[in-house]
Image (cartoon, rainbow, N blue to C red):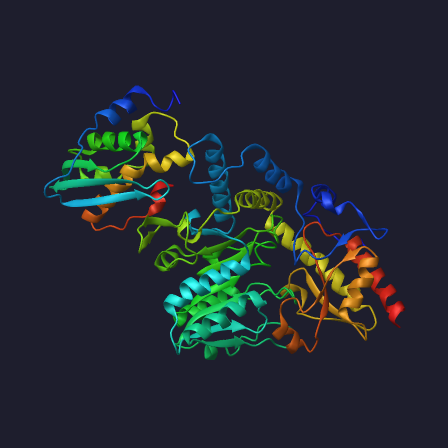
Amino acid sequence: MDDLYQQNILDHWKHPRNSGRLDSPTVSYEAINPLCGDKLRFDLLIEDETVKDVLFSGRGCAISQAAASMLTEEVKGKSLAEVRSLGKADVLELLGIPIGYSRLKCALLGLKALKVGVYTAIDEEWDEDELL
Amino acid sequence: MTQIATPQLDLARIRADFPILHQQVNGHPLAYLDSTASSQKPALVIDALTDYYRRYNANVHRGVYQLSEQATEAMEQARHKIARFINARSPREIIFTRNTTESINLVANAWGRANLKPGDRILLSEMEHHSNLVPWQIIAQATGAELDFIPVDGDGRLALDDLNTLLTEQTRLVAVTHMSNVLGTINPIAAIAQAAKAVGALVLVDGAQSVPHFTVDVQALGIDFLAFSGHKMCGPTGIGVLWGRKSILQAMPPFLGGGSMISRVELRQSTWHELPHKFEAGTPAIGEAIGLGYAVDYLSQIGMDAIHQAEQQLTAYALERLDAIDGLQTYGPAVAERGGVISFNLDGVHAHDVAAVLDQHGVAVRAGHHCCQPLMNILGAPATTRASFYLYTTPEEVDQLVVALEKCKAIFS
């Protein structure tokens, strides 16, 4: 457990970055982890093919909250093409801790909310296989 | 007499992997010739089951503790292995069921109820196992759809000359077996699928006898659903697979409701989980799914093409020996179009009596209608005796069968 809850994870969990709701987001998507019932929503403000602003909200475990918080920092100001290419490996690198099979769903919940939102904005179909 | 070439398979080594084969039955070495009903299991699969129950038994997709983590990962690894084995595009297209029967019932209920209406037609064949017939009768009755049948010809093959007449604009689904469990006939699925696509019908293949015995590539066949059972392919009982094309599975409503298959649950309504979980309500057969993954490893390592080739050589040898017995009739097509299943009858002796005498000589075979009553009516035989082969079957076991059949003839002459 020492490995899992490292300082940076706990820091993002206690002080989530970019937490809340946007007044008028371009897209907003809530992802659910049916295994535990956790929900995470990403609101995106998109201008000129770029993520101008991003806020996340919803309940979840420390892993899912920290991953979502880190993701918002990562994608703010990035182009849609850059956000589109983000994947499982990027989230695991941001977290920097070993994630077991069942916690993977927690770690990737924010990524799913973010990417379904971006795909909606660029009118592309989301494929759940991206999280495999 | 027993010198036939099986260069691909090292039979002694394969048989050493199956503990059950090394025993005496009624004073004779066991000759297990009923793999079509259920195959035997290699030690690797038995060990995988006990290893799961001894070391990491826990429920999957729920716990965040070590054991549950390990069990979940092992089960999902099995799903990946099975996806590769049949060349599925994604492991999410692999739905764990109890067996072929449940897989077909899943499609009949979930897809059938949502898509069939009065006037729609389902095309089956006359050689279907009851598991690929009765679910469609039930769903046809419930929806008003009608059933059509591809006939069986005198050699026990599907008569496909009139296929394009049987396929109409109203045909919504073609459900056909890849290999007959009575005759061993291997059906030309790719050609049937192509004709079905031309009228916009979906294609479900009963792979219970094909997936264990030769390479089945769902993409190359151009089909939409494939159903098969673990226990016929060196895996445990209680675990089967439905493969379906993702877009079709996604559009289908669920089959069974309950835990694991939901996304959001309220008192009066719910939404469904992603594939494959949408179709896997309740705690699955975890150890059995893991065991099936190991069975797939085992078969892949030996090679499905080598297994098929060896079985065909053995079938050719067995047909030659059986056809030489006076008063014995075998059923089914020529070797090139069949797998390792031979149904036969001895003149004037009921199949059950034949099987009972064979058992006295250590030979295990199936006797009866083989869950194919309509096909038996066409063959004009209320019952047959059936010998079937797998990768561990030896020419000596075929010889043992022939000797026992001669004894049987003597008893009833």
Residue B162: percent from the left, percent from the top? 51, 79
Can residue B42 be seen at all in this image of the molecule?
yes
Of the pair A37 and B143, the residue shown nearer to us = A37
Residue B341: percent from the left, percent from the top? 68, 62
Of the pair B94 and B26, the residue shown nearer to us = B26
Relative to B345, B108 lies left or right: left
Q: Residue at x 59, y 75 (%)?
A: B152
Q: Residue at x 48, y 51 (%)?
A: B87
Q: Considering the image in quadrants, where does the C terminus of chain B appear?
A: bottom right
Above or below for B391 versus B170: above
Relative to B13, B142 lies left or right: left
Relative to B100, B396 lies left or right: right
Q: Residue at x 40, y 67 (%)?
A: B113
Residue A125: percent from the left, percent from the top? 27, 51
Q: Residue at x 17, y 41 (%)?
A: A43
Can residue B90 be seen at all in this image of the molecule?
no
> Quadrant of the rendered structure where residue B404 is?
bottom right
Of the pair B331 and B244, the residue shown nearer to us = B244
- Can you name the residue that lies furthest to the front here? B267
> Quadrant of the rendered structure where residue B248 is?
bottom left
Above or below for B7 versus B33: above
Q: Considering the image in quadrants, where does the N terminus of chain B appear?
A: bottom right
